[in-house]
Amino acid sequence: MGKNSPFTYKMVIVMRTDLNMSLGKMVAQACHAAVGCSEEGKRTQTKHWRRWRDEGAKKVALQADSFEELEELAKKAESLDITYVLIQDAGHTEVPPGTTTCIGIGPHQEQFIDKVTGNLPLL
């Protein structure tokens, strides 16, 4: 484990703030992202997933201002071979169908995730 933190692995959820979703809606969307990333990570990057889970399954909530920002994060994650999941809403409540509400990134080593999201503010 890292010297400055008890965790060396994490997952981040980056929520779009431009959609003005209610707190409950944001939590639901973040949960979709966390579950999706966990399932994808377990399937495709088992070693990283297992270390993340065993270290406490750290998750960090961050914010972005636009869909374009989420797309850019997805490109960066893909270039570093980090699991990510873009969440599109069904449109039953607050946003139109197909709206991308957030992205989950990881689980992976913090040092690599920070290369993708290190400049984003906490939610």
Image (cartoon, grey):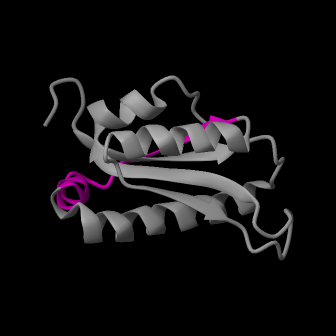
Percent x, y of residue 78: 40, 46
Q: Is residue 63 magenta?
A: yes
On the rendered structure, is 54 left or right of 75?
A: left
Task: Classify the position of the C terminus by image quarter.
Answer: top right
Task: Classify the position of the N terminus by image quarter.
Answer: top left
- Tally of marks: 0
Which one is in front, 86 or 8?
A: 86
Which one is in front, 70 or 78?
A: 78
Q: Is residue 51 magenta?
A: yes
Which one is in front, 51 or 79?
A: 79
Which residue is pictured at 56% across the width and 52% down the height? Answer: 103
Which residue is pictured at 24% across the width and 59% down the height? Answer: 49
Which residue is pictured at 75% across the width and 74% down the height? Answer: 90
In the rendered view, tell whether residue 89 sits above or below residue 18.
below
| Quarter of the image where one finds residue 114 | top left
* Boundaries of the magenta span: 48-64
Percent x, y of residue 3: 15, 25
Which one is in front, 18 or 78?
A: 78
Percent x, y of residue 33: 53, 61
Percent x, y of residue 84: 44, 54
Which residue is pictured at 80% across the width and 41% down the height? Answer: 18
In the rendered view, tell whether residue 6 sits above or below residue 90.
above
On the rendered structure, is 25 left or right of 60?
A: right
